[in-house]
Image (cartoon, grey):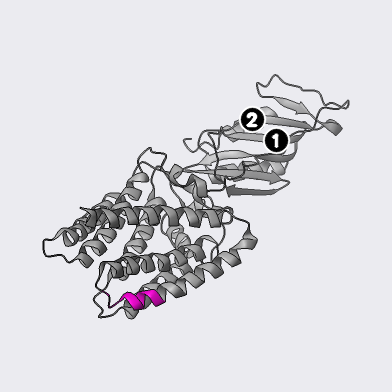
Amino acid sequence: MMSFAAPILFTLFVWWLSTGAILYLDGLARGTFVWSLAGASLLLALALWGLVASAGDSSPFGAYEAFACGLLIWAWQLVTFYMGFITGPRTIACEPGMTGWPRFVEAVRTSLYHEIAAILGAIVVVALTWGAPNQIGVATYFVLWWMHQSAKLNIFFGVPNLGAELLPEHLRYLQSFMTRKPMNLLFPVSVSISTILAVLLAQRALAAQASPFEAAGYSMVATLMALAIAEHWFLVAPLPVNALWQWGVKPAPAPAVAPRAPEPVERVAPVNDDSDYPAAALAGGVESWCAHMPADCDSSGLLAVLRSAGAGAFGEVESVKGIVRTGANWVRFEAAGERASLSPFAPNSRLEPLAIAKGRRVDRARLQAALDGCSAAG
C-alpha cells in the first residue's frame, strides 16, 4: 500500500505548495517580479537538465525526478504568465457589450503569447525524452497543460465560481472575459475526458504486472488528473476551496466607488424636491446625490445616459460615478462632461448597484428615471 500512498501524498503536497507559492510571488510588489523570474528560470534550466538525466531511469526515484521536473517546467509557464512577462497582445478589459466570436477572439489575444510558449514547451519536453523509457515528466507537463486550458475555457463559457479574487492586480482585466453562470456545455465534456484519462492512468499504476517505476510514476500522474477533475468541480460547487491557498494570496484592496463627499459648509444649495434618495450639500451650491441602480444594466444604455448627463439633459451635472452589474460582471462607471467610461472590477463583498451624481440644479427625478431605464430586463 505504501507504494501507492507515498506518490499520492507527494503529488498532493507539491500541487498545494507550488500553487500557493506562485500566488504568493504574484502578490508581491512588481519590482520583485524580475527576481522571481530569474529564480524560476534557474529552476527551469535545472528541470530541463533533470528531465534529460532521468529519461533513461526506470526506477521509482527516476519517476519522482521526472514528475518534479515536468511540474517545474510548467510552473515556469505560469510564472511568466501571471507576472505579466508572457501574456498576449491584448492587455485591457473587454469592451462592454461584446459577445460571441469577437469576445472569444479577444479573450485568446489576452494570452496568445502564453499559449505559444506552452506549445513550444511541450515540443521541448517531448524532444528531450523522445524514445526514452521514462515518460513521466512528459505526461506530467501535458496533464498540467490540460488542467489549465480546460479550466480557462470553462471560466470563459461560464461557471459559478470564477476565482477572480486570485488574479493579481495587474491581470484584473482578465475578469472582464469571465462569465458567471450555473453551467456551460463544455463542463461535462471536460470532466468526462478527465475522468476517462484518470481511470486509464490508475489502471496502469494498479496493473498486476506494473513495475515499481510504473506504480509510482502513474500513481502521481493519475493523482494529478484526479486533481484536475476536483478543480473543475470546484468551479461549480459552493465550497470555499480558495482557503487552501489563503496563506499565499495578498488581499485585494477594496474598490473605490466614488470619493467621499466633503463636510457641509455654510454655502448650501437648497433641496427642491422630496426625493427618497439622500443628497449632501457641498460648497459653491453643488449637490451630491446618491441613487439606486437597476440590478442588471445594459451597458450601451448606461453609456448613453452618462453622455446625456454630460450634455446637460438632467441639469448642470458635473460628474456621475458608481458601480453596477452588466450581465455576469460588475463594472465601475464614470462620466465627466461628455466623456464616459466603463471598467470592470471585482468586488470583495456583496455590493448594491449605486450611482452618485454631483452638480447644480440636478433634475434628480429625470436622471433616476433614465438610470432605471438602463435595466437589461427592460
Separation of residues labelled 1 and 2 (CA atoms): 8 Å
Q: Quadrant of residue 182?
A: top left
Secondary structure beneath dot 2 equals strand
Q: Do we see residue 216 in this rendering?
A: yes
Seen as rendered, the residue at the extreme right is 266
Residue 11 position, x and y percent, is 33, 56
Highlighted magenta segment, given as a residue range: 49-57
Seen as rendered, the residue at the extreme left is 208
Q: Which of marks 1 and 2 is nearer the N terminus?
A: 2
Q: Please give the name of the residue rendered at 27% of the width and 72% of the height, measured from the top-left corner.
A: 135
Mark 2 lies on residue: 291
Q: Is residue 265 above or below residue 170?
A: above
Q: Quadrant of residue 171?
A: bottom right
Mark 1 lies on residue: 357
Tell whether label 2 touches label 1 (CB within 8 Å): yes
Foreground pick, 220 / 164:
220
Magenta: main secondary structure: helix
